[in-house]
Image (spheres, helix red, strand yellow):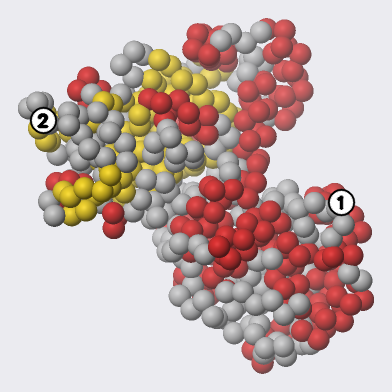
Amino acid sequence: MATKRYAKSILDRKNVALDEWMEEIRGQNEGAVPRDFVQRTAKTILRKCDPKQYLLSHATIVASVDCYSPRKVKTGRLSNQGVQIDVKWPDFRIKPECHPIINNNGDAWQRSLLLSSYRTFIGAHNYLEHIQLPELSKGFIVDAIARDLGTSCYIDILVATDRKHGQLVSDILTGAITGLSMGCISLFTTCTKCGNVSADDSQLCPCIQYEGKGSKFLDEDGVEHPLAELIGHVSVPNSNQFIEASWVRNPAFSGAVRRNILNPDSAQFASRMDKARVIQTVRAAMPEMDGLKKAASTRVAQGQDEAPQDAGQDLFGDQGGGDEGGGDEGDQNQQGQDSPDQGGGQDQGTPPDPSTPADKSDAALTGLLEKAQEQIMTILVDKLGEKLTPKPEDVGTVAPVDLGAPNDNLVRSSEEFDRRLKERFPRSPTLVRWASSVRRLIMERGAHGIRASGITARDLIVLSWIEDRCNGREHSASLYKVAMSVGPMKSYPSKNSYLAACRMRLGHDLSPADKSFLSRKGQISSLANF
C-alpha cells in the first residue's frame, strides 16, 4: 500500500494577461503558440470554459532534485541495523546543491520522474485544504509546464478557480489565502540515506522510521545530507501521479509561489482551457490510486470510505442474501413504497443507492467532508427509498463496454429478465420497476441511451448488482463498496492506477478474481457521463 503526499506553495504577483502565460511563460519553456491557431479556436473554446467564469492563477508548484549513486553502493536485499531493506536503484542520494529544494516535509522528486509525470496535473481538481470530494471541487488545473533552471526543474501550473465560490475568490484576490498545495500519489518511496524502497509503513527502513525525515546524516565522504524520501521512480510507469492542487493557508514549499492572477479578458489561452476541461471531465470522479498519498509533514491514509469489516454482510445491512430477498429487505422496501414518489417508477431515474447509516459509520471523515457525504447519501436514498440500493458491482453483465457488439447479456429477452427479477425481489416492486425500465432502455438504445437519459455510473453499478443477484452470482459486499467508491475506470490514467485505487480502498492486496471483477465494474461505470 502507498500513501498520499502534498507539497505546498505560496502565491505572489497578480493581474497579468493570458498572453504572458501563452507566449512568455509557456512559449519560452515549451515552444511558442501560433497566434493564428489561438484566434481560430478561441471563440469556440471560450464558450466551453469562459475565463470570465474562472479566476486563473499561475503558481510554481514543485521542483525536482538531481541524484547520484554513492560510492560502493549495493543493490538488492540488504541489512540495515538488523532490518532487511530492499535497494532497487543505486542513484538515491540527493546532490548537495539540491538540498534547499527538498520540500519541508522531506519529500523530493527526481528530475527524470518529474518531467515524465508533471502533465498528470492537467485536468486535476482544484480543492480547498485538500478536502478531496468531487462535489466540493473549486475548479481544475488548466495547464502545466516545466521550466529548466539548471540545478532544478520547476513545474508551473495554471489553476482555474470557479468564481461562483465568491468567498474563496475574494480571499485569493485580497491575499487572505496565499498558498497552493499539490497532491500526488506514489506507489512507493526511496530513502535517500540507505536506498530502501518502501510501499507502505511496514516496509520503512530504520532511517525513516526512527531518525525521521529532515534529520541530518554524514555520507561516505563526510558530507552532511538531510534525510528525505524520493517519490516514485522514472523506470516504473505511473509510480507518481499528481491528482490535485488545493488552496491552503499554511504553505510548506518556500520555492513554489503563485506568480500571477491572470487577466480573464484575453482569449489567447482558449485551446489550453478546452484541453484541460476535457481531461478534467474524464477525471471528474477521481479517487485515489493505490499509492503513497503524501501530505506536508504527515503520512496519512486519505481513503474517504473504509471497506466494511463484515464482508459477508450486504451493502444495505441485511438486505439481499437468500432468494426470497430476506425479511428486512421486504420491510425496508415496503417503507420505500409508502414514501412519496421516491423515483422507483422512473424510466431512467436515479436507482437505489447503497447508502445507509452503516456506510456513514464506515466513513472515516470529519468536519465538512463527513457532513457533505452525509448530505449526498441522504439525497440518493430519498429518491429510491431506504436501503433499496444494492452495491456497485457487475454492470458488466448489464452494460458491457462495447454495447454495439453482440453480447449474451444484452440479447436476453426482457421477459426472462423480468421474471427472474420478480422472483429474486418479490417484495420490492419499486426496485423491480426501476431495474426493468432502465435495463430495457440500455438494451434498446445502448451507450447513447445511457448518456442521453442521464444514467450515472452509480446507476449502472446498481443495475449490475441486481442482475448478478438474478443470475445467482454472489460477490463480497466489500467489493461492491469499493467499485462504487472508486468510480469509473476512465477517471484514471491507466487500468493499473484504477486497480491501485481499488486496492487502497479495500485495504489489502487484490486477488486475480478481485482484479477481474473490479476491472469489469470500472469499465461498466465508464459508460456513463458522470
The residue at 66%/28% (across/down) is: 275
**Residue behind mark 1:** 404
Q: Using the rendered view, name the quadrant where residue 115 is placed.
A: top left
Residue 75: where, in percent of width, then height? Answer: 26, 40
Instruction: Give me the disc on residue 220.
Output: 2
Question: Is 445 positioned to the left or the right of 226 in the image?
Answer: right
Quarter in which the N terminus is drawn: bottom left
Residue 44 or residue 390, whichever sits in front:
390
Residue 396: where, in percent of width, then height? Answer: 73, 61
Q: Is residue 304 above or below residue 56?
A: below
Is disc 2 placed on a helix, strand or loop?
A: loop
| Residue 252 appears in the rendering | no
Q: Give the foreground label among 2 and 1.
A: 2
| Residue 86 appears in the rendering | yes
Going from the N terminus, do you reach mark 2 or mark 1 first? 2
Residue type at numbered disc 2: Glu
Q: In this view, does 82 lie above or below 211?
A: below
Residue 473: where, in percent of width, then height? Answer: 69, 76
